[in-house]
Image (cartoon, helix red, strand yellow):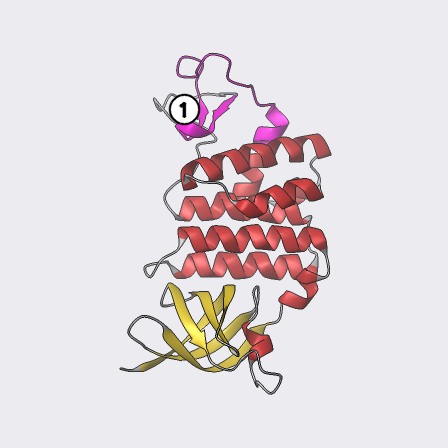
Amino acid sequence: MPSYRDEAVILRTHKLGEADRILTMLSRGHGKIRAVAKGVRRTSSKFGARLEPFMVADVQLYQGRSLDIVQQAESLGSYGADIAVHYDRFTSASAMVETADRLSDAEATPEQYLLLVGGLRALSRGDHAPRSILDSYLLRVMALSGWAPSFTDCARCGRAGAHTTFVAQMGGLVCADCAPAGSAQVRAGTLDLLRALMAGEWTVIDGASAAETAAASGLIAAYAQWHLERGIRSLEHVEGSR
């Protein structure tokens, strides 16, 4: 059984035995990987700190039958420490890696990996508001996974126009004829912010009002959780930190 090497983000860890850990990782070239890191919980471990959640590492693994085995690990991005000391960054990062874990599999694309790394890097640096980084990540990773919301034409019938009703269950904006009775209307400023979050236009995002940001966050959370079919547990803590 061969060894292989790849870049990977640590999504989550579980204790195994007295000194080992099971790691769930999103890699650049091999999709989602589950592997055992032997002895990493011992104080003498050479690479235990490199294999914590939110860290990015160059790992060498031995291919096993059910779980691979970590043989070496070199740090590529030490984002965990700067994220963990800020509650709002930590909760946003937790929601991001939980979403990545839910959406990815062995066939995950390099773009999914790069998007997550970029989001964690931005959180660790404090480049933008943590919730905005999370919202942009959620929209873009949903699009990469085949669930891009419509912010222009009607998501149901395809009618072009300036629609103002967003229905998560229907895939985004819908026209007046397709909108269910009682659907909430979305303000123009919120729609502009949603489009900016999808495109990564940070000048627009950073200049949005608190009301527009809160409204966009609610729509994005509803959309992501509907298409993932069950709630993203970490989002509850993100909402509470606002």
Q: Nearer the viewer, residue 1 or 204?
A: 1
For the residue pair 115 and 238, the one nearer the viewer reads as 238
- Highlighted magenta segment, given as a residue range: 165-192
Residue 178 shown in magenta: yes
Quarter holding the N terminus is bottom left
Quarter of the image where the C terminus is located: top right
Vertical comparison of 50 with 217: above or below: below
x and y, in percent, of residue 228 in the image:
42, 42
Foreground pick, 7 / 18:
18
Q: Which residue is depicted at the point 58% across and 48% down?
A: 134
Task: Find disc 1 in the rendering and name its residue.
Answer: 154
Label count reads 1
Image coords of residue 211 (percent x, y): 70, 30
Residue 6 in which image quadrant: bottom left
Q: Position of residue 139 (x, y in %)?
A: 50, 43
SS of the residue under disc 1: loop
Q: Is residue 191 located in the magenta-colored stretch of the structure? A: yes
Q: Is residue 190 above or below residue 66?
A: above
Q: Amino acid at mark 1?
A: Cys
Q: Residues within 10 Å of mark 1 (few under 14, many from 20)?
A: many
Is residue 15 at least partly visible in the picture? yes
Residue 20 relative to residue 206: left or right: left
Of residues 19 and 124, the one nearer the viewer is 19
Q: Looking at this rendering, what residue extends furthest in the front direction?
A: 18
**At 42% across and 28% down in the image, what residue appears?**
169
* Residue 200 visible in image: no
Q: Position of residue 109 (x, y in %)?
A: 37, 59
